[in-house]
Amino acid sequence: MNPRIASINAVASCVDGYDPDALPVDAARAAIRACLAPVGGIERIATRSVLGRVLAEAIVPAIDVPAHDNSAMDGWALRAADLKHDAETVLSEVGTALAGRAYAGTVGPGECVRIMTGAVLPRGADTVVIQEIVKADGPRISVPSGQKPGQNVRAAGEDLKTGIPVLRPGRALTPADLGLIASLGIGEVAVRRKLRVAFFSTGDELASIGQPLAEGQVYDSNRYTLHGMLTRLGVELVDMGVVRDDPRALEAAFRSAAASADAIVTSGGVSVGEADFVKQMMGTLGEVLFWKIAMRPGRPMAFGRIGSAFLFGLPGNPVAVMVTFYAFVREALLVLGGRGDDSALPLLQAPAAHPMRKVPGRTEYQRGILYRDGTHWKVKSTGQQGSGVLRSMSEANCFIVLEHARGRVEAGEPVPVQLFDGLI
Ligand code: AMP
Ligand code: MG
């Protein structure tokens, strides 16, 4: 291991409430966070391809947007100084300004110019009156009283101003950002390279799709949920398949994953009393901590580093894989990928539709359905909450996150809810 990097254990153990055998969710998250720094690597890519990528440079406008004062409406451009306060003002139209075709002259006293939305405001004019309220009789234009100086004009630079940064490094770029970058005429953007994440399932009982299911076997579903969750994060995937509970196979898999990826995510083999090859091998090849987290589902988890790759050893139960991924891995990968903006998932409050059993001393991630009951939103459980019941994740549209210290929930009590929408 790189000796310049501080020991994971030394860093994690400094976190408040750090107890590897009964680790509160927040302490585990803080311990992971304390060990991470963004990985290096920047590439320049075309603006149209940067959606979701993490910006590596500040975007600083070299031009004003809009570049000129222009009209926000179709109508007539005029001088506010000409307007009478309490009577109609009659002006004479001296020309036309269209979007992309400016009026070349200057608007003098008593004059106005026919103008269309987006057209540059002619010299001399400072106000636009909309066409719906104007009486036009040939070049004779009558404007009613009650107009405000400067109305219906978009000022140069009101959207973006030269020299004032608009997007900071570390931001995950949105569709609006793409448009904003394009509005500055910028065709290429520096973004962080995509994180490479290797993942595999461990277990002698796992069959891959396409193989017949022998007695006692289950199909490997975790690799598919992981594939889906990682894809949504926009990382580069290295799918390493199923690895048997066999020391040599595990060693080869970990070594190859560590050599090719920034992070490794595995499922299975970290439970207490497991035929312990996975844990042993993780511990032999790198610096890995084994945690019992005060949460349900998903108690056991390994976190550490093998070579320069961070390792997230998730439990094998299908729901536990997803819960621990969203509770810990998602944010960790975003940090490694250079996300500097707040990437934590929002928690909303919704009233519980029914009582919920809960024991204090652990965080519970119940699978919930947020639904509309008349004019109000409520949240109910999907029912069976076993950590092997993957159907509960599929039926749910949210996690009901019952906090560490909380006990039983009564009907109508507000509970924190984390929506899946756009996420899984
Ligand atoms: P483990 O954490 O390895 O003790 O596994 C816990 C439970 O999850 C066992 O019932 C396993 O059969 C199941 N399991 C482990 N890995 C997978 C997987 N990749 N797909 C589906 N189920 C799994
Ligand atoms: Mg196993």
Image (spheres, rainbow, N blue to C red):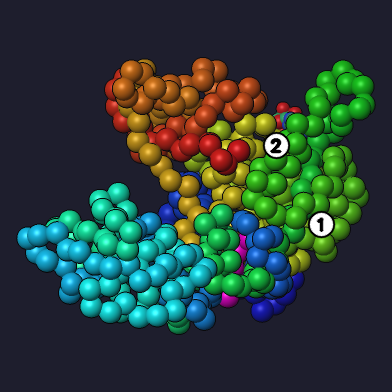
In this view, the residue in front, 49 or 384, is 49
Q: Is residue 54 magenta?
A: yes
Q: Secondary structure at mark 1?
A: helix
Q: Tell me the tag on residue 97.
A: none
Q: Is residue 15 above or below residue 6?
A: above
In this view, the residue in front, 237 or 279, is 237
Q: Is residue 106 magenta?
A: no
User: Quadrant holding ligand 1?
Assistant: top right
In this view, the residue in front, 219 or 271, is 219
Q: Residues within 10 Å of mark 1 (few under 14, many from 20)?
A: many
Identify which residue is drawn at 31% across, 77% down. 107
Q: Secondary structure at mark 2?
A: helix
Q: Is residue 307 visible?
A: yes
Could you tell me the amino acid type at mark 1? Ala
Q: Is residue 157 visible?
A: no
Identify which residue is drawn at 49% across, 79% down. 63
What stretch of residues is rendered in magenta? 53-57
Q: Mark 2 to mark 1: distance in Å?
A: 19 Å
Identify which residue is drawn at 83% across, 20% down. 216
Identify which residue is drawn at 56% across, 40% down. 422
Q: Residues within 10 Å of mark 2 (few under 14, many from 20)?
A: some
**Residue under numbered circle 2:** 225
The spot of residue 414 in percent (x, y) is 31, 31
Going by the image, does 293 lie left or right of 360?
right
**Residue under numbered circle 1:** 257
| On-image quarter of the C terminus | top right
